[in-house]
Amino acid sequence: MTGLVGSAVAILPPLAQEQPVGGPVPAEAVEALDVITPVPSSLGADPGRIALGRMLFTDTRLSRGGDRACITCHDIRSNGASAVARNLTTDGTPMPRNTPTAFNAALSFRLGWAGDIPTLQDQAEIALTRPEFLGGSWPAILAVIRDDPALAGPFQAAYGREADRKAVIDAINSFERSLLTPNSRFDRWLRGDAHAITEAERSGYALFRGIGCAACHQGVNVGGNLFQKVGIFVTIPNKAAEVLRVPSLRNVAVTAPYFDDGGVAALPEAVRLMARAQLGRELTAAQTEAIVAFLGTLTGSYEGWPLTAPQAADAAPHGGAQQP
C-alpha cells in the first residue's frame, strides 16, 4: 500500500531523545525502529502555558451556549475521544465524521480526517469559533478570560500581557502538545525491555509489517504522516476514490468505533476490512487475532495511567470539535 503523499516527518516538532531501558535493545526491536519510533515523553511545552490550556480545554464558558468544551468530545479521562460513532453539532445534527482522539495529535503532520487542517493553531481556531463545534466568538471568549481572576492572572504571568487571541490559541496548543501517551508496551520493547511484549504480539507485529500495513502505518504515530486512497482493492461503500489522512494507530485498541464514519465497532472487523480493501488480503482468524494482539501493545499512558475505552455512561452523543 503506497501513500499518495510522502511522509512529512520533517515538519513535525523535534522529538525528545529517550534512553533505552532494560539493557541492550533486541535485534528485532532495532530493526523495528526503522518503522516505528517511541512516543516522546515531552515536546517541551511551557508548564505554565500547559496549565492554562488545560483550564481552557475544559471550560464550557468559551462556547456559544455555555454547555460544551473541548473535553466534551475529547475525553482525556479515557481515550481522548468518545464512544459514539459521530458526536452532535450545536444544532443537534450528527457531525460529518467520527471524533478522533486528541492524544498524540501534535505528532501528526496535518489534522482532521481529510487532512484539511494544516496546524494545531488552525484547529484551535476552528474548534472555538465554528458554529457546529463550540461556536464561540473572540470578543466573548476574551471577556470570559479577562474577567476571571483565575485565568487573567495566569495569562499575564505566562505571556506578559492580558489574554488575546494569539495567546489563547497558544495556551490550548501547549496543552494539546502535552497530550502524549508514552510508555506503551511496544515502545518499552523498542527501548530494550525484551519482556514488554509476548511472542504472540511480536508475531503480530511481524505480520503487520510483512503484509504491508506498515507501508502507511509507521513513524512515531504509527500513521498520521501521509494521505491514502480509501479502497484500493475493494471499494468501500460511500468512499469511492476518497483520499484521507492515514490515521494513527496509537491507542487504537481503546478508541472504538473505527473509521471516519465510526461505522465499525470492533477492532478485529476493522483489521479484516482494511486488509481486504487496502491490501487485497483475506486474513484468517489467526492472522487477525495476531495483528489485533500487536495493536493492543500500542496503548500508552497519560499522566501515568494507561488509556482506557470510555465508560458506557459517558457514551451518550454530544457536540464538540473534531481533532485528529
Image (cartoon, rainbow, N blue to C red):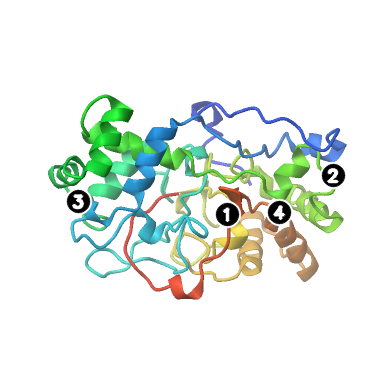
Query: Which mark is first along the chain, 3 or 1?
Result: 3
Q: Quadrant of residue 153?
A: top left
Verify CB contact (< 8 Å) between mark 1 and mark 3. no
On screen, residue 298 above or below 120? below
Q: Position of residue 90 (x, y in %)?
A: 24, 64
Q: Circle 3: is it few (<14), some (14-19), or many (20+) Cα within 10 Å?
A: many
Verify CB contact (< 8 Å) between mark 4 and mark 1. no
Three-letter residue code for mark 1: Ile
Verify CB contact (< 8 Å) between mark 2 and mark 4. no
Three-letter residue code for mark 4: Thr
Say which residue appears at 18% left-offset and 41% top-offset: 142
Query: Which mark is first along the chain, 4 or 2?
Result: 2
Verify CB contact (< 8 Å) between mark 3 and mark 2. no
Q: To which residue does mark 2 refer? A: 194
250 vs 27, left or right, is left
Three-letter residue code for mark 2: Ala
Observer-side mark, 1 or 3, equals 3
Question: Disc 2 and disc 4: Cα gap in Å?
Answer: 13 Å
57 vs 302, left or right, is left
Q: Position of residue 154 (x, y in %)?
A: 30, 35
Verify CB contact (< 8 Å) between mark 3 and mark 4. no
Q: Position of residue 279 (x, y in %)?
A: 66, 55
Q: To which residue does mark 1 refer? A: 232
Query: Which mark is first along the chain, 1 or 4?
Result: 1
Give the SS element for disc 3. loop
Could you say which disc has been placed on residue 297 in the image?
Answer: 4
Q: To which residue does mark 3 refer? A: 136
